[in-house]
Amino acid sequence: MDSFTLIMKKIAQNWLVFFVILILGFQTDLSVQTEKKVFIKKENGKYSFYRNGSPFIVKGVAGYTHIKELSESGGNTIRTWDTMHLDQILEQANLYHVAVVVGLFIPDNKNMQYFYNDEANTKHQLEVFTAFIRKYKNNPAILCWCLGNELTFPFKLKYNSFYSAFSNIVDMIHREDPDHPVTTTMVNFQKKNIFNILYRTKIDFISINTFGGLRFIKEDLASFEWLWKGPFMITEWGIDGPWGFNAQTRWGAYLESNSTKKANDYLQLYKQYVPVNNPRYLGSLAFYWGYKQEYTHTWFSIFNNEGASSAPMSALAYIWTGRKPADSFPALSHIQIKDWPKETDYIFNADSSITAVAVFDSHQLGNLKIKWEILPEDWFTVNTIHSLRKPDPLSNLIINDSIPETRIKTPSTEGPYRIFLEVSDQKGHFASCNLPIYIISKSLKR
């Protein structure tokens, strides 16, 4: 057989598989059994979760802490990425009447072929998940299972072992726990992934993690209705991260909004872009309900490391309840360097002295707790992933820890840094902002 004939044969085989999958996929039945504890029901053209016999619209967050505060703010669901801390999460969720989307971690795209082509791996994986589902399936806090996070669902036949293992887990969950649906997540709206999820897996609904892509989600959904009209949930949405939508300094450091602006951004993003009126919409989960290091320790964190909450919590509470919380939050605007132009990149000599000024959105110099810090920029990444460990603050650089002004000694080593300011009140609320700076070791003339 010549090479041309061989190539054409392979193309024909792939197209045959394509059409077989397509035909089988269109026969996928998303009907539900109303005796289940949790199920998805379509009524009058609209999909809804039913939980314990009543319609349930997901209004919640991604995270694993502060479940009491979530409930008090009007949220009803929290999503985990894995099973760490699950016993504690479920205990708190039951106590405060919050549902849980339980994340089931499976090897990601980089390890897909290596892991799934080994039958011993997939057999052990299925055994572990089977025991896990049997252990937790009767917990009343569980809303659904989420198998994998932001996987790529490739079409090529060489990934058949992955799809086989994935489907075996889904089938096992459906068999062991018919009371809870199964979903999986993808990054943004990807038609290729949707096609492969629909026609090569047996999940019950699709979930989408989207940040910048949220601005286009309504149009994306409409443009693909010719193929996919099933239910969906948005499992991560929120403010723009350190990527293309944010301004940068000349040395490439992204500019982070203050906590007050983040609250406004949450509200505007939800009002303008979250497709709450789409009849296929099951609900959404905001990111991030907790405290974490991701580029900075303040970028996504709605809480600080002491458990105080910031203004985005009030925005989400308003989204969930339609009521504005009675408590106000401190409102920092920005950090200004005294005697330097505001609209500039801040580049300073090493071992020099500068005056940083805290600028507030309103006059708020009352009984506030103050914390100034200088941290090295989270500059280096591994496979474009930033460290999840907060850099250690540099000591002995804050000369007088006060507001509105403080004297700061600049670092001795050349490189990128950030000045952080956090102020907190007596009610457990805080505000934060930061300023990227660059230090050079040679003398700088202005």
Image (spheres, rainbow, N blue to C red):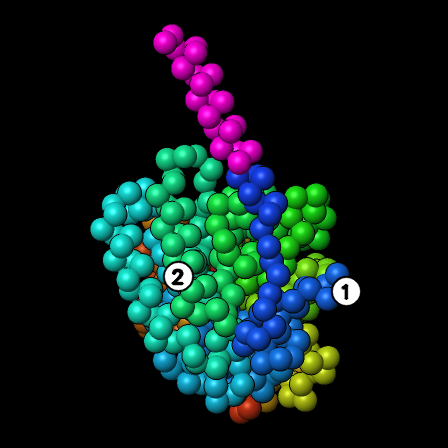
Image marks 1 and 2: residues in contact by CB distance under 8 Å: no
Task: Please check the rendered image and state whether residue 4 is part of the magenta-colored stretch, yes or no.
Answer: yes
Q: Could you tell me residue 251's position as x and y percent?
A: 47, 47
Q: Which residue is mark 1?
A: 44
Q: Could you tell me residue 365's position as x and y percent?
A: 60, 85
Of the numbered discs 1 and 2, the one sitting upstream in the chain is: 1
**Looking at the image, can residue 174 be seen?**
yes
Classify 406 as above or below 182. below
Residue at (49% x, 33% y) in the render: 17
Classify 166 as above or below 104. above
The crowding category of the residue bearing disc 1, from other C-alpha atoms within 10 Å (few below 14, some 14 to 19, many at least 20), is few
Q: Which residue is mark 2?
A: 172
Residue at (42% x, 71% y) in the render: 373
Helix, strand or loop status at disc 2: helix
Of 269 and 30, which appears nearest the observer? Answer: 30
Q: Could you tell me residue 111's position as x and y percent?
A: 32, 46
Of 345 and 226, which appears nearest the observer? Answer: 226
- Badge count: 2
Q: Amino acid at mark 2?
A: Met
Q: Could you tell me residue 322's position as x and y percent?
A: 73, 79
Q: Amino acid at mark 1?
A: Asn
Task: Please check the rendered image and state whether residue 234 is part of the magenta-colored stretch, yes or no.
Answer: no
Helix, strand or loop status at disc 1: loop
Q: CA distance from mark 1 to mark 2?
A: 31 Å
Give the magenta part as a residue range: 1-20
**Quadrant in the rendering for residue 65:** bottom left
